[in-house]
Image: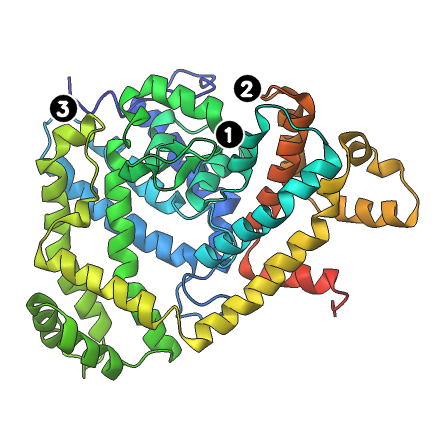
Amino acid sequence: MSRYAEFIRADRLRPASVAESTVQAIEADRARIVQCSPVRRLQQKTQVFPLDVKASVRSRLTHSLEVKETGRQLALRVVAGLEPEVDRDALISLVEMACLLHDVGNPPFGHFGEAVIIDWLGRHLPLLFKSAVGVPSRQWPMLLADLRQFEGNAQSLRLVHNLQDLNLTLSQLAALQKYVRGAYQPRTGGRWQQKPGHFFSERPLVQQIRRCFPSTAKGRHPLTFIMEAADDMAYGVADLEDAVDRGVLSLAELERALLQDGNDYLIQLWQRSRVDEPGFFSRFRQGLGQDLLPLVSEQFLYYQQAILEGEHDQPLLAAEQPAAEALQWLKNFARGHVFRRREVESLELAGFAALKGVLDAFAPLLALPAAEFTALESRFDANGQLLRRLFHRLPPRHLAAYHRDSQSAPFFESEAEREWYFRVRLLLDFISGMTDTYVLEEYRLLCGLQG
């Protein structure tokens, strides 16, 4: 039997009503993912330039489609080097769908939005908890640490499992997790511990994943390595292309820096791509990809034993090879010369005001004791009517998850803390699921600026 058979399985948290083969289960996952609303919402979340309406600039959806295609090309090369018994189609599909889903948990304005949310939570949660619940239990410091660490990848797992209830195979869910640490757990020195990979709310799911795939207790699912490499390869050039297209960066400026600081490989690639002719970025990207695809697949196959055992602790693109080093230079240049431009930061400042404003507006719902929160429908005083209208803006799907989990989720020592924990998750689910334009519209409405 193939060594990969234990990682490519039909198991679901809730078994299918009709028996499925592995291929049937993975195909069913594919249909559920492609048709789910979080993937559709990616079309209104931009990759680099928030609130940009220019059609040629990448959205999170077009970026994810590019990552999906790069992941497919990598997976095709990997399976060509594996034993014949490997379920080729299932492996490739798992990689593709992990790539398509990898950004669905990102909040409006991407990593900047994450930073805004984390800062707000750190400033406000302790006082809101004191008002709503009062005296904490011995478990509360762990739960508070969990709530204060918002992370897009962990939110992706929560979104597809607990909010969308897609009931995907455990193989697909495991392949989506870039990090192995829970937000409620202390960070250790391991590379895959750097960020939280799941929240306390998904602890029961992750325990089941680890029972199914024991090596994921200390390392990643093997196919996650391919998804991560595909993401890095896709945005490494794309962010610079979008910056040039948007007029934030000139090709001449990029060329000067590259010829001065880039390695010999990168300089030669630039010159071969004929910068003065139409279609330059397409040629440049394809040339780099032609060298990165075999490099990444060879790295996976070379380290596959350690990867399968959960022992490998380096990204596939960490290889000290000219093409990988060239990609890293491009990513570093984008961070230093695109994301810090006045035009980008101005858009992010608008996002900061909108995100903070919406969080501030909904914060009073977190200050209420549980009995008052659940009785909002019966309040007719002025403040109660305002809070009730805020409550009515929360999506029914998220409210259903709140009502379910706040009453029965396991591992909580205090019922009051469980209810409040999921009330905070309710607000975070709502706001992190917004598109860039939606959060701005919501902020305008709450400020009385609608219309």
Please state the horizontal and vertical placement of residue 410, each as a whole percent of the image: 56, 19
Task: Specify which label sits upstream in the sequence, 3 or 2.
Answer: 3
Distance of label 3 from label 2 (alpha carbons): 40 Å
Please state the horizontal and vertical placement of residue 116, each as a whole percent of the image: 53, 56
Number of numbered discs visible in the structure rendering: 3
Q: Which residue is mark 1?
A: 200
Kind of residue indicated by mark 1: Phe
Q: Nearer the viewer, mark 3 or mark 2?
A: 2
Residue 221, image quadrant? top left
Element type at mark 3:
loop
Kind of residue indicated by mark 2: Phe
| Residue 85 badge | 3
Tell me, yes or no, if residue 395 can be seen here.
no
Distance of label 1 from label 3 (alpha carbons): 37 Å
Residue drawn 18% across the image and 84% down it: 276
Pointer 2 with pointer 1, Cβ within 8 A: yes
Q: Which residue is mark 2?
A: 411
Residue drawn 40% across the image and 31% down it: 28
Say if 328 sits above or below 405 in the image. Answer: below
